[in-house]
Image (cartoon, helix red, strand yellow):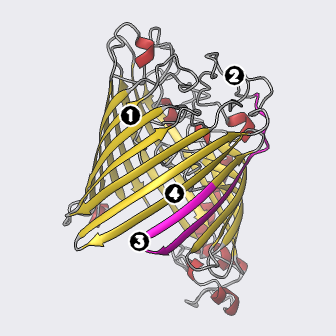
């Protein structure tokens, strides 16, 4: 791919040509009206609106990232490791009469790994998380991993509302950027945000393409769904919907209401044309009692198939016509002295499996934990205790401890278990540190996870391969600028 070279060349020209006269890191988006009132004088400090200043008063940002990841499976099953090195470079122009242009590119190298495409002879699969650092469709590709992540035009309204079109990033409960690998999720389509009314925010969008965080190329929605694996139909047959679905894209609509700092309510609707409709409701409340903060919340999700679930042949359909998903997730917690503790619970009813394409983002339930998705399960209970500590005198350090219990159906109960997920206990520690002074911009993350299978699978290694009785470690260094 040659897109990234072009991006870097453009940025270098912009920066080298104007950096001595202007501060390109100054964000001029704060005052749109002032652009139309200024003259084109490069020595004036106030915002300018000639073509040269439209670009030179833009903003460059990015990061360099090193990522080490390893997973140790039980007994004779494979152990995987990977070292990823790369960077991201982003640029957006200043705002002229409400308009703004943006571009973002990423480059990645696999600088050392085990054979991530090899099939484990006992487990029957290949690397799960390590391969996601690079390209799941091309596991042997170690160098040609650059990608044009964003390329958009954006128009701002007076109060900060905007509409944008192109290759963009999203942040919603089910479809989101999720920059926790070497790449993030990126989307192609239209997106808008309306904040003209006090206490309300509205979003409306249509997404027709995606490049997931484990992909290098861009795909239409109908082709991307299933790249992460298709699992099984409710009848126990292997699903084969990848490349067989019929959909034009995903429509997203939301309304959020926040009357004060204590309460927030939001509703989201995801319409995957010709496949399914997902409704997400969420209410959050927090209140301070002296120095103690109390918080609680509830989420409800409802899913219904549309037409034939994507294909008339059930082997090729994404959503079964006889299933209706009902999911509820809740949270209650306290925060004081730098500690934040919460208990979180999610229940998926026996009415159907929770299904949303993993290629489109990561679900944000209260029980969401690193390296696991509840997607594909029904008739399931998940209980998670979370403890976060940020030292009052060292706010740059954050430590998370998580204990999670999953009670899932038997692996042969396909009507509720799409990916043959086993019940487990999950223990995790996540340490993050943001350096300051001379090392400002350097971020560190260490994630350790141990997942213990709750049943004896000593005679069935395929059941626990990359799912239970495993140790996982991630070490990440970022230099942000």
Percent of width and height locating residue 298: 46, 54
Residue 203 sits inside the magenta stretch: no
Are discs 1 and 3 less than 8 Å apart at CB? no
Q: Residues within 10 Å of mark 3 (few under 14, many from 20)?
A: few
SS class, disc 1: strand
In screen coordinates, is 48 left or right of 409? right
Q: How many residues crowd around disc 1 within 10 Å: few (fewer than 14), some, or many (20 or more)?
A: many
Q: Earlier in the sequence, mark 4 or mark 2?
A: 2
Q: Is residue 261 magenta?
A: yes
Residue carrying label 4: 282
- Report how far apart the C-alphas of labels 2 and 1 lie in the structure: 30 Å
Q: Quadrant of residue 46?
A: bottom right
Between the C-alphas of marks 2 and 3, the distance is 46 Å
Read off the residue under disc 3: 262
Q: Which of 173 and 243 lies nearest the eye of the viewer?
A: 173
- Write down the residue under mark 2: 240
Majority SS type along the magenta span: strand
Tag 2, which secondary structure? loop
State the quadrant of the C terminus: bottom left
- Residue interval drawn in magenta: 244-268
Viewer-nearest of discs 4 and 1: 4
Viewer can see residue 190 = no
Up-down relation of residue 445 to residue 125 (above or below): below
The alpha-carbon separation of the residues under discs 1 and 3 comes to: 39 Å
């Amino acid at each position: 791919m040659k897109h990234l070279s072009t991006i870097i060349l453009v940025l270098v020209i912009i920066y080298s040509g104007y950096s001595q006269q202007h501060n390109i890191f100054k964000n001029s988006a704060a005052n749109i009206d002032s652009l139309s009132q200024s003259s084109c004088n490069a020595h004036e400090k106030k915002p300018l609106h000639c073509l040269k200043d439209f670009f030179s008063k833009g903003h460059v940002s990015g990061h360099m990232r090193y990522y080490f990841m390893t997973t140790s499976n039980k007994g004779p099953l494979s152990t995987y490791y990977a070292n990823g090195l790369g960077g991201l470079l982003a640029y957006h122009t200043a705002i002229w009469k409400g308009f703004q242009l943006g571009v973002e590119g990423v480059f990645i190298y696999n600088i050392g790994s085990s054979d991530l495409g090899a099939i484990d002879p006992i487990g029957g699969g290949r690397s799960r998380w390590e391969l996601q650092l690079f390209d799941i469709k091309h596991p042997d590709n170690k160098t040609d991993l650059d990608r044009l992540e964003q390329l958009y035009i954006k128009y701002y309204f007076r109060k900060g509302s905007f509409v944008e079109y192109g290759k963009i990033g999203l942040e919603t409960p089910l479809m989101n950027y999720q920059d926790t690998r070497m790449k993030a999720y990126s989307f192609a389509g239209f997106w808008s945000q309306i904040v003209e009314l006090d206490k309300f925010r509205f979003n409306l969008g249509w997404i027709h393409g995606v490049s997931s965080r484990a992909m290098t190329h861009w795909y239409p929605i109908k082709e991307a769904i299933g790249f992460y694996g298709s699992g099984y139909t409710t009848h126990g047959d292997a699903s084969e919907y990848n490349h067989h679905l019929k959909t034009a894209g995903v429509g997203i609509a939301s309304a959020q209401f926040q009357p004060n700092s204590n309460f927030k309510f939001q509703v989201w609707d995801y319409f995957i044309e010709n496949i399914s409709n997902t409704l997400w409701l969420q209410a959050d409340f927090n209140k301070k009692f002296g120095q103690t903060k109390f918080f609680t919340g509830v989420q409800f999700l409802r899913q219904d198939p549309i037409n034939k679930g994507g294909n008339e042949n059930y082997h090729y359909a994404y959503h079964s016509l006889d299933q209706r998903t009902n999911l509820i997730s809740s949270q209650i917690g306290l925060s004081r002295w730098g500690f934040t503790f919460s208990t979180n619970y999610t229940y998926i009813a026996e009415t159907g499996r929770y299904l949303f394409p993993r290629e489109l983002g990561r679900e944000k339930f209260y029980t969401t934990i690193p390296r696991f998705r509840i997607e594909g399960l029904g008739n399931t209970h998940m209980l998670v205790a979370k403890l976060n500590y940020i030292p009052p005198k060292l706010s740059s350090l954050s430590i998370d401890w998580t204990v999670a219990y999953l009670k899932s159906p038997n692996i042969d109960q396909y009507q509720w278990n799409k990916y043959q997920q086993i019940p487990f206990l999950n223990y995790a520690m996540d340490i993050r540190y943001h350096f300051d002074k001379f090392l400002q911009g350097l971020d560190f993350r260490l994630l350790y996870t141990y997942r213990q299978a709750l049943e004896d699978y000593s005679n069935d290694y395929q059941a626990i391969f990359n799912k239970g009785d495993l140790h996982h470690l991630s070490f990440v260094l970022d230099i942000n600028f």
